[in-house]
Image: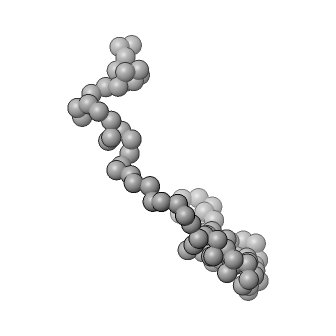
């Protein structure tokens, strides 16, 4: 999906607790077709989201895996390394 505005009320589940959820359309009584931008707006959203000049960002993992040092070495100022 290009943008969150393009999902419908049947794609969103509201959790009442860890084991019970209901669809957004059930909770708020959505009628068929409600919850979506117009066809013209959907086309514009897709075009905007598809048009990008940004280069892909190269990542190699969480910052802590890219830090210098041996695994298990405590960082300076790490509260876990302080004797309390």
Looking at the rendered structure, the number of numbered marks drawn on it comes to 0
For the rendered model, the colour scheme is one colour
Tell me the residue at 37%/16% (across/down).
82
Q: Is residue 26 visible?
A: no
Tell me the residue at 72%/84% (across/down).
39
Q: Is residue 8 visible?
A: yes
Q: Residue 46 lies in what quarter of the image?
A: bottom right
Quadrant that contains the C terminus: top left
Left or right of 75? Residue 12 is right
Tell me the residue at 56%/66% (across/down).
52
Q: In the depicted view, which residue is nearer to us: 84 or 18? A: 84
Quadrant that contains the N terminus: bottom right
x, y percent for residue 15: 60, 63
x, y percent for residue 57: 44, 55
Tell me the residue at 37%/21% (across/down).
76
Q: In the depicted view, which residue is nearer to us: 26 or 36? A: 36
x, y percent for residue 10: 63, 77
Spot the residue most to the left. Answer: 70
Q: Relative to residue 83, is residue 41 depicted above or below?
A: below
Q: Residue 65 lies in what quarter of the image?
A: top left
């Amino acid at each position: 999906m290009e943008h969150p505005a393009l999902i419908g009320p049947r794609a969103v589940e509201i959790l009442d607790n860890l084991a019970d959820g209901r669809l957004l359309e059930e909770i708020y009584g959505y009628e068929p077709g409600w919850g979506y931008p117009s066809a013209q707006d959907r086309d514009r959203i897709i075009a905007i989201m598809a048009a990008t000049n940004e280069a892909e960002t190269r990542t190699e993992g969480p910052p802590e895996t890219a830090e210098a040092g041996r695994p298990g070495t405590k960082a300076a100022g790490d509260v876990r390394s302080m004797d309390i």
